[in-house]
Image (spheres, rainbow, N blue to C red):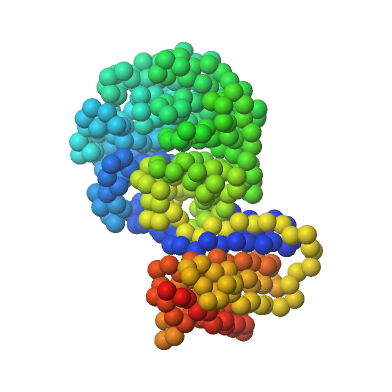
Amino acid sequence: MKPTSILKAAAMLLLCTISISSQWFQQVSGTTVNLHSINSHHGNENFAWACGDNGVILHTTNGGTNWVQQVSGTTNDLYSICFMESSSAPIMAVGEGGIILRTSNFGTNWVSINSPTTRTLRDISDFNFIAVGDSGTIIKSSNFGVDWVQLPSPTTVRLNAVSAIFSNYIVGNNGTLLKGFSSGTNWVLASSGSTADLNAVPLFGSADITVGSSGLILRSTNSGSNWFTQVSNTAVILRSVEYSVNNTSRIYICGDGATILKSTNSGTSYGFQTTPVNVDLNSIFFYLGDDRGFCCGNGGTILKTTNGGGAIITAVSQNSNVMPGNFSLEQNYPNPFNPTTRINFSVPKNSSTLSLKVYDVSGRIVQVLHEGTMNAGNYSVDLEAGNLAGGVYFIRLASGNTNLTRKIILLK
């Protein structure tokens, strides 16, 4: 479900606050298979990998401008790939039938490693070489992924994700939560307080978080002793979560229906981000920095952002059931402004062609605030114009035969 669909399914009258910046943009992956995992070199974002169905492994050496398929040597579905910060900097991938692949030359050659299990492996940690999967499977390597042994597991349910360095958690179906000790050698059951499927834990972060089915976001601030829910404003399956590497108040989550959620306040509130696709998104990776990340999903989808993913759309119910009767575009406030101003507008009926754009005096578009579907309601847009020169600009709202314009003045 895309953000506009979320708005339609929410309260009858909504107020949306949109913080303007660049958006996620789609990269050409060269494949149409479902991609389940994406990961980058932790010191060089030009080098990244993605993996998916039929043994597909993709690699880029230029930040995703070009993705090239590498020879994996398998047709098994691959569910997780990661760059290991360790000796020889190996990249590891795991998947269907317990397959384990390893390369120490950035994927020029992938080697199939002897696996202690035939159970499907769903995730592999970026640190400490631990992988988890079906029927409670936990395996570990003590020599940089060359040899693997199976560890005792306190559960037989499917395990979906593992984090084994900044916090030691494994999560799985039916609310299963395991805590790790002794560098991930020992795992014990803990209570998540939920029976929903838990699908992901982040690589990085000092505050614990996991996400799962029905829009569930669980947080803990006491090392997993107790967990509480945060409001996601969605009921879709959430499949991946990551912190920004330098600022753990920024959290990114992706899931079904092209859903990407972002929080800039440690999860106190989450907003939706616009994406150029309408497919399920399976993996998000933000170890590159506060604003630079990748996301991948079904149909060969790869997305990238270089400044935080763009507009954050937060839906808040109003204490009114009266829909606006007409299109309106109010004068921005403050005006003149520097560098941020707020613009309120109203949409009386669902529109599939609504646009809100900023023009300079020559008629050139300098910012696109919104373009596409917008549901009926009242909206508020925070225009950030720090990159524009001072002067006179125009805000134009257009939908069908409606065309409304306001003059704004930016002081520099």
Taking the spot 46% from the left edge, 48% from the top edge, the residue there is 298
Taking the spot 39% from the left edge, 24% from the top edge, the residue there is 130
Residue 216 shown left or right of residue 85 in the figure:
right
User: Which quarter of the figure has residue 42?
Assistant: top left
- How many numbered tags mark residues here? 0
- Which quarter of the rendered picture does the C terminus lie within? bottom left
Image height check: is 393 above or below 248?
Answer: below
Image height check: is 117 above or below 406?
Answer: above
Taking the spot 52% from the left edge, 41% from the top edge, the residue there is 239
Point out residue 100 in the picture as x, y percentages from the top left corner. Answer: 33, 28
Nearest the eye: 105 or 331 = 331
Image height check: is 333 above or below 285?
Answer: below
Point out residue 305 in the picture as x, y percentages from the top left corner. Answer: 40, 55
- Examine the rendering and report whether any part of residue 392 can be seen: yes
Residue 126 shown left or right of residue 408 in the figure:
left
Taking the spot 23% from the left edge, 38% from the top edge, the residue there is 106
User: Which quarter of the figure has residue 374?
Assistant: bottom right
Point out residue 255 in the picture as x, y percentages from the top left corner. Answer: 53, 46
- Examine the rendering and report whether any part of residue 372 can be seen: no
User: Which quarter of the figure has residue 144?
Assistant: top left
Point out residue 265 in the picture as x, y percentages from the top left corner. Answer: 54, 46
- Which quarter of the rendered picture does the N terminus lie within? bottom right
Nearest the eye: 184 or 173 = 184
